[in-house]
Image (cartoon, rainbow, N blue to C red):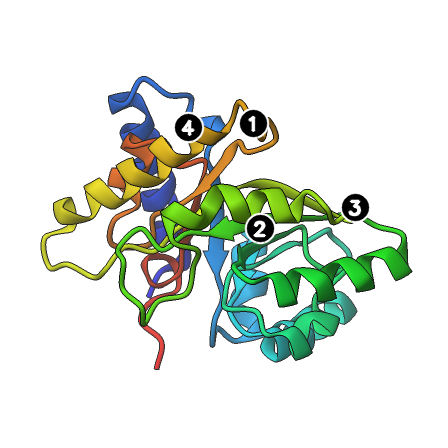
């Protein structure tokens, strides 16, 4: 699979989707998802202009980021995009630019405790369950304002926006209402929580629709690196 062609294709599709929505493509951040992608492929993507990568698993992030830091001189921005368990917080705090998936107070307390000890502030997004599927992680929309109010009590956490994962559909257009829902939630809450600006939504199959509905961050893996097993 031609990584360079894939990246050019994704960037062109981002540009076209943004133009359809009357948006500036430069305001949309592409996160290349490197779950189960070998280090040499990540290095190739970095050489081709990708500078932000997302990992789903804390221990894979720990190992991969260490290997890369030993092999390259340039700066890599890491995002943590998977479900974060309390006992795995130690692997990522102080090492990632953004956590996409905060959805529990117990994990928030652990992030805050470790951030305080490092004297840093950790930027996070709140994962929102816009589909109502209990099998998915995320805060239910009805509980979101209360959750945000609780997070305001943590001095070393900064909530920067929201994230969601719609159900999988063969017809990607069916994902649109879930992206609309997340944008509307952000718009309803931003007056009370003014730092709530980012919308992380859209993956390989549906990122263009997400951009049309206001995504500021998209998480693309297989469309860049190919299918992983």
* Residue placed most toward the observer, 51 or 207: 207
Between label 3 and label 2, give the one nearer the viewer.
3
Relative to 194, does residue 49 appear above or below in the rendering?
below
Residue behind mark 2: 52
Q: Position of residue 218 (x, y in %)?
A: 41, 46
Q: CA distance from mark 2 to mark 4?
A: 29 Å
Q: Quadrant of residue 184?
A: top left
Residue behind mark 1: 192
Relative to 75, does residue 38 appear above or below in the rendering?
below
Q: Is residue 96 visible?
A: yes
Residue behind mark 4: 188
Q: CA distance from mark 2 to mark 1?
A: 30 Å
Q: How many other residues sit within 10 Å of disc 2, few (<14), some (14-19) or many (≥20)? A: some
Q: How many other residues sit within 10 Å of disc 1, few (<14), some (14-19) or many (≥20)? A: few
Q: Position of residue 63 (x, y in %)?
A: 67, 78
Q: Is residue 50 visible?
A: no
Q: Is residue 97 left or right of residue 100?
A: right
- For the point 44% across and 55% down, which residue is it? 139
What is the number of the mark on residue 155?
A: 3
* Residue placed most toward the observer, 83 or 223: 83
Quick one: SS at disc 1? loop
Between label 2 and label 1, give the one nearer the viewer.
1
- For the point 89% across and 52% down, which residue is it? 119
Q: Earlier in the sequence, mark 2 or mark 1?
A: 2
Q: Quadrant of the C terminus?
A: bottom left
Q: Earlier in the sequence, mark 3 or mark 4?
A: 3
Q: How many other residues sit within 10 Å of disc 3, few (<14), some (14-19) or many (≥20)? A: some
Q: CA distance from mark 3 to mark 4?
A: 24 Å
Q: Earlier in the sequence, mark 3 or mark 1?
A: 3
């Amino acid at each position: 699979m031609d990584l360079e062609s894939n990246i050019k294709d994704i960037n062109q599709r981002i540009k076209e989707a943004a133009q359809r929505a009357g948006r500036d493509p430069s305001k949309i951040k592409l996160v290349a998802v490197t779950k189960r992608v070998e280090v040499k492929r990540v290095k190739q993507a970095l050489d081709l202009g990708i500078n932000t990568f997302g990992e789903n698993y804390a221990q894979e992030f720990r190992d991969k980021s260490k290997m890369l830091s030993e092999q390259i001189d340039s700066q890599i921005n890491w995002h943590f995009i998977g479900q974060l368990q309390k006992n795995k917080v130690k692997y990522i705090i102080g090492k990632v630019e953004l956590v996409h998936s905060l959805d529990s107070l117990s994990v928030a307390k652990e992030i805050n405790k470790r951030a305080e000890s490092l004297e840093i502030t950790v930027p996070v997004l709140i994962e929102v369950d816009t589909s109502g599927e209990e099998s998915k992680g995320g805060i239910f929309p009805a509980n979101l304002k209360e959750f945000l109010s609780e997070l305001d009590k943590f001095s070393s956490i900064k909530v920067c926006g929201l994230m969601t994962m719609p159900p999988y559909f063969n017809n990607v257009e069916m994902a649109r209402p879930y992206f609309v829902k997340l944008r509307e939630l952000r718009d309803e809450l931003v007056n009370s929580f003014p730092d709530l600006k980012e919308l992380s939504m859209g993956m390989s199959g549906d990122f263009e629709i997400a951009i049309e509905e206001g995504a500021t961050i998209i998480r693309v893996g297989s469309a860049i690196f190919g299918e992983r097993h």
